[in-house]
C-alpha cells in the first residue's frame, strides 16, 4: 500500500464543443484540485445523440497537456490496436514530453465491433493484437532505434529519440470490460502493465480482483507493489442512500467513507465517471466533491 493519500481524478466525456471550451473545463478541474483528468477514445459516437460527435482523444490530450500544468492526464482507455503500434508509441511519448511527464497510458482491447470493422481490423483477434502492440510500444520506448518481429508487425530502422520523459516509460494501466472481472485484463495488468484499472466493480469483486492480480504478478516473478490498483466508478453524489447503495453513491459523508475504504484496500487512485450532463453540470459535481467530500477523506 502506498504511503501517499489516494489520488482522485475524473473522466470527462465526451470531448465535445470547441477547443476553448475544453481547455476552460480542464483548467477549471485542475483548479478545483483533481489529481487526474482523462478522456476517452472512440471513433463512433456512443450512447446515442446526446453525446453526439466528439474530437479525437489523442489530439485533445496533446492540447490539454500544453494547457494544464499540474494534473496528470491520459485516456481511459485507448484501444491498443486502433493505431499502428509504432505510431501509438510515438504519440504517447510526445504527449508525455508535452505534459512534462504527467501522462498515464491507459489501454484496453476495445469492445465496439463496428469500430473494428470500419477500421479494417480483426475483432476476434483484438486481445492478441493488444498484447503484441503493447510489447512493440515498450520496445519502441526502450531504444533509440528499436526493432521487433511479431505476428502483426515487424519493423526496424525507426527512430524513437528522445525517449519518454518518464523513466523507464509512462505508467501503463490495463482496463477491462465494465462491471465484470475480466480475466484477460487482470492477466495483462499483472504481467505486462503498471496498473489495473477495473471499471464499475462492487466492493466484493474489487477485493477479489486485487487478490487475483497480486497472485498473478507474484507468479510472474514481479516484486510486491509492481502493479497499482486504480479503479473507476460512477460518482452519484446526492441525498443519504440506503445500505444497498452502489460504491460512491449517496451523501458526501458516505462517498468520503467509500474513498477511505478504497484507500484502505490498497488502491492508489480512484477515477470517477461524471454524470451525463452538460459541462456546467459536470463542473458543479466536481466542485461539490472538492468542497464537501474531499475534506472527509483525509
Image (cartoon, rainbow, N blue to C red):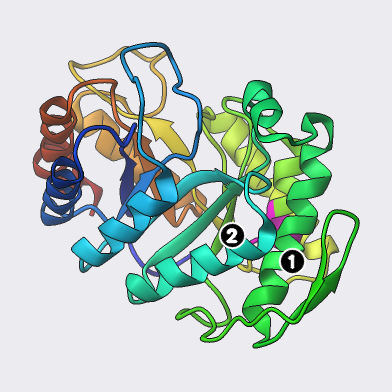
Quadrant into which the C terminus falls:
bottom left
The residue tagged 1 is: 136
Q: Using the image, determine if residue 220 lies above or below residue 237.
A: below
Could you say where residue 279 lies in the image, as x and y percent from the top left? 16, 30
Kind of element beneath mark 2: helix
**Relative image position of residue 207 (x, y in whole percent):** 60, 40
Question: Picture quarter containing residue 159?
Answer: bottom right
Give the residue at x 18% y 23%. 278
- For residue 117, above or below residue 152: above
What residue sits 20% from the left and 49% below the top? 26
**Numbered range of the magenta stretch:** 189-193
Regarding mark 1 in the picture, which secondary structure is present there? helix
162 over 155 or under it: above or below: below
Q: Nearer the viewer, residue 237 or 182?
A: 182
For marks 1 and 2 on the same chain, the one whose residue lies earlier in the sequence:
2
Asked if the stretch drawn in magenta spans residue 192, the answer is: yes
Identify the residue under disc 2.
Answer: 88
- Is 112 positioned to the left or the right of 273 in the image? right
**Residue drawn at point x = 50 percent, y = 54 percent:** 266
- The percent coordinates of residue 129 (x first, y second) are 79, 48
Residue 6 visible, this angle: no
Which SS does the magenta portion mostly show?
helix
Residues packed near mark 2 inside 10 Å, few (<14), some (14 to 19) or many (20 plus): many
Residue 182 in the magenta stretch? The answer is: no
Residue ID at (41%, 66%): 95
The reply to whether dot 1 and dot 2 touch (C-beta < 8 Å) is no
Amino acid at each position: 500500500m502506498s504511503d501517499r493519500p489516494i489520488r482522485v481524478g475524473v473522466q470527462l466525456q465526451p470531448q465535445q464543443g470547441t477547443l476553448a471550451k475544453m481547455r476552460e473545463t480542464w483548467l477549471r478541474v485542475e483548479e478545483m484540485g483533481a489529481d487526474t483528468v482523462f478522456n476517452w477514445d472512440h471513433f463512433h459516437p456512443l450512447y446515442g445523440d446526446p453525446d453526439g460527435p466528439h474530437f479525437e482523444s489523442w489530439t485533445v490530450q496533446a492540447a490539454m497537456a500544453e494547457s494544464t500544468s499540474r494534473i496528470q492526464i491520459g485516456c481511459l482507455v485507448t484501444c491498443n490496436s486502433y493505431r499502428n503500434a509504432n505510431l501509438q508509441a510515438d504519440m504517447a511519448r510526445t504527449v508525455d514530453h508535452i505534459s512534462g511527464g504527467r501522462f498515464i497510458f491507459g489501454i484496453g482491447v476495445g469492445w465496439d465491433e463496428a469500430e473494428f470493422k470500419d477500421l479494417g481490423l480483426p475483432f476476434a483477434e483484438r486481445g492478441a493484437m493488444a498484447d503484441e502492440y503493447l510489447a512493440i510500444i515498450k520496445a519502441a520506448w526502450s531504444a533509440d532505434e528499436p526493432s521487433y518481429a511479431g505476428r502483426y508487425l515487424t519493423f526496424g530502422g525507426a527512430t524513437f529519440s528522445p525517449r519518454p520523459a518518464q523513466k523507464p516509460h509512462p505508467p501503463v494501466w490495463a482496463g477491462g470490460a465494465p462491471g465484470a472481472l475480466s480475466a484477460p485484463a487482470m492477466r495483462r495488468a499483472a504481467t505486462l502493465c503498471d496498473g489495473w484499472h477495473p471499471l464499475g466493480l462492487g466492493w466484493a469483486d474489487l477485493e477479489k480482483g486485487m487478490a487475483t492480480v497480486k497472485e498473478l504478478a507474484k507468479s510472474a516473478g514481479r516484486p510486491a507493489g509492481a502493479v497499482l490498483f486504480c479503479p473507476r466508478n460512477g460518482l452519484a453524489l446526492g441525498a443519504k442512500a440506503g445500505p444497498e447503495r452502489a460504491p460512491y453513491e449517496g451523501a458526501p459523508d458516505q462517498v468520503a467513507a467509500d474513498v477511505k475504504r478504497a484507500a484502505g484496500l490498497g488502491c492508489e487512485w480512484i477515477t470517477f465517471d461524471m454524470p451525463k450532463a452538460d459541462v456546467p453540470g459536470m463542473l458543479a459535481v466536481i466542485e461539490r466533491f472538492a468542497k464537501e467530500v474531499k475534506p472527509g477523506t483525509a
